[in-house]
Each structure stands twice: as structure tokens, then as C-alpha cells.
Image (tube, helix red, strand yellow):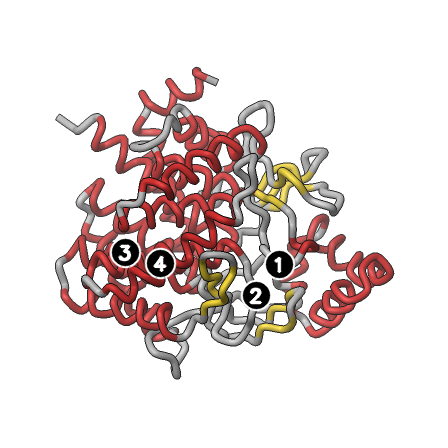
Amino acid sequence: MSAVRATVRLDRARIEGGLEAFVQWLRRTGYASQDQYDFWATDYGIWAKARFYRHGTLAAPLVAPLLALDWFWPGLRRRVAPPRRFAIGDAHYLMGFAARYRTTGDQRALDAAIALAATLLESSVPGFAGPCWGYPFDWQTRRGLVPRGTPLITTTPYVFDAFLELYELTGVARYREVAVSIAGFAAIDIRDLAVGNGFAATYTPFDASAVINASAYRAACLARAAALTGDDRYRQLARGNAQFVVEQQRADGAWPYSAHDLRDGFIDHIHTCFVLKGLYRTSLALGDGALLRAVERGYEFYRRHLFHRDGRPRPFAETAKPQIVWLELYDYAEALNLALLLRAALPTEPTADELAGRLLDELQMRDGAFVTRVLRGGLRNRVPYHRWAQAQAFCALSRYAEALTIETPRR
């Protein structure tokens, strides 16, 4: 795989060309898209999924048609749901364009980031302690139905990151104010559940779950807000959530999805990345070496168990369900983001180079967008979803291009 690394490292024009092709595609298609959950957010999808969660394999015939559509005829989702905008997509596009502006100085990239910030503010959910965001569809989970517009701690921190990044880029005080107010939502409206010596953050203001990546998201958001404002309340909340995450880490370094529900004991690629990123950012903001040691153990498990032998990201390390998905765009995007984030602290090389090369050479389509998913046997889902994960891939590649520019500045 060293050949891929050398090609990517030496050919910065290939990265820039791939990013420009994607930006042109985005300008043609706009920021609304189909979504991974389109079939599952229909009335039938919600009904069938609820019964599957309640009755298990007895209800498998109810969800089988939706799985078949999702895997083999993904384009049919256009007939059951309109294209929609997603806050998590807009936030990643904002951060991607911010990286493009830092790399190229192109004013159009900064203008795009500023426009996305305005759209995000307009789409925030009213009635809470600060701006917050969720999904534009009803989402059936194992713990019940989450109505559209319910703010999520797994979405809102990305918007916090985006506004903080835009403030650091432009110096405009308004963006800092928005970031601080978003942290107010995370601190006040998201609840803490005592677990061990720490506190699990709820997924929404209304549930009582102990999903581990939710606590990692909140810990990172509030730890960075504490560094920004000096507010010790945020620091203490972040420490409690981070302590919960550390205590849930298994002896082998892995984290299951949920601390309480054994049915959610799977270990997959993207949620492992979410936990590692959140815990690492918290360790930096709090200056906590114990958190970094947990990240090191988690990253060792991640590298051993969440990549195929050929170096491509593997969707699951452990799951009770049969899997026919071989590759996920979301896994590539989060793996690249994680490698770039950790490269100063851990031996992540040449992971970032390999992933960037594979994204462009193997998954980018002629129109500039990326393949969403590859099934075992090679069948490809070419329907682009901004949330899953065109936006994350663009953001990751933009950050990678920026890192290359810093390492090998133009003469």
C-alpha cells in the first residue's frame, strides 16, 4: 500500500482536482439530497422497524422488503421521500469550505461557508436553552420514536464545531456567540445519568439512554466551550461524560454502542471513530492524560479490527446481524478525519494517505460525487446522500488537502 501513499503525497493536483470536481457537482445539485433513512422514515418503515425491535426475528419478514430496496434498488427512495437538507451535512460542508479557503484563499469557499452558517441558524430548533438541531424525519429507534425536529447531541456538536471554526477563521464575534449559545443547549437541555463514577449524556432532551458516542460528543463540545469561555460548569460536565466513556471501554480497548442495552452491543467503524474523536478532543481541551491513554488503547483495537486485510475500512468488528455491506463511504470519511486528527499524537501514518487515495481513485464517480456503499459481490449504491456521507467525505478530503499544503507549502 506504500504505492498509494506515494502517489497521493506527490500528486497534490490529484487531490485538488477531485475536490474541485466535487464542488462543481455540489453546485449543480444543491444541498438537499435523499437519505440513508428514507425508506425507514415512511409510515410503513416506522411501523415495521418498531415491530422488529419488539419481536426480533419473528418480524423479520416485515423489514425484509425495506432492506431489499435499500440494498438493491436504492434509487427508488426518490419515490417515497423528497430531497431534504440535513444540519449535519451543512455543518460538514461549512467546515470543508473553511478548509478550502485556508488552503486556496478562494473567496468563493469563504462565501459558501458564511452562507451555510446563515442557513444553519435559520434551521435550528426553537424552544431550548440554545440553538440545536436534529433530523428532518421521524426516526424509529430501539428505545422508541424520535419525532422529526428533536434536537440530538450527536448532530448539534458538529454545528458547534462549524461555528467555532468559522469564528477562528474570520474573527467575527457573532460566530463565537453562536458557538457559546450552542454549548448552553448541550449543558442545560441534555441530561446526565449517573453511571459508575461518571455521567452518561442522554441522546436527546427527552430520553434516558446511555449511548456511548453521545457522551463523547457532549464531552468534547463542553470541554472546548470551557476552554473558550472559562466556564467551569462546562468543564465539570465534560469530565463526568468523559469518565463514563472511559469506564465503558472494554479490556481490549473497544467500545460497544450502548452501555445498557445488550441488543446494541455491536462495535462498528463510524461510532468507534466518533468516540475516539470526542475523547481525544476532550483530552486536549482538559489537558487530561488519562483520556489520551484510553484513546491510545481504543485506536489500537480500531486499527486491528476495523479494517479489512487490504486496508479498506471494515464496517463492523462485532455484530449479531448478518452483514452484506462490504464498504461504506461514511467509514472512509470518518477514518480519514480520525487519522488527520490523531496524527500529532499517535502513529496514524500512512493511514490518511491511503484513505485519501482510495476515496478519490476507487469511490469518486465521474460527476464528482462519491459511491455511497459497496455490497459483497461488488454491487454499488451510487445514490448520493449528503448526511451519509458526501459532506463528511468532502470535509475530510478538504482537511487532507490543507494538511498537504502545510507540509509542502507552495513556492
Left or right for 306, reference 386:
right
Q: Which element type, helix, strand or loop, lies under badge 1? A: loop
Q: Position of residue 72 (x, y in %)?
A: 72, 48
Q: Which residue is mark 3?
A: 224
Spatial separation of the CA atoms under disc 2 and disc 4: 17 Å
Query: Which of disc 1 and disc 2 is earlier in sequence?
Result: 2
Say which residue label 2 marks: 209
The CA span between labels 3 and 4 is 9 Å
Sequence-wise, the earlier of marks 2 and 4 is 2
Q: Nearer the viewer, mark 2 or mark 1?
A: 1
Which image quarter: residue 20? Answer: top left
Which of the numbered marks, if any, corresponds to residue 260?
A: 1
Residue 211 pos. (x, y %):
54, 58
Q: CA distance from mark 3 to mark 1?
A: 27 Å
Secondary element at image label 2: loop
Q: Which picture quadrant has residue 175?
A: bottom left
Q: CB under 8 Å between callouts 2 and 1?
A: yes
Q: Is residue 42 depicted above or below 154 in this figure?
A: below
Q: Residues within 10 Å of mark 2 (few under 14, many from 20)?
A: many
Residue type (three-letter) at the residue carrying disc 4: Ala
Q: Cα distance, mark 3 to mark 2? A: 24 Å
Element type at mark 3: helix
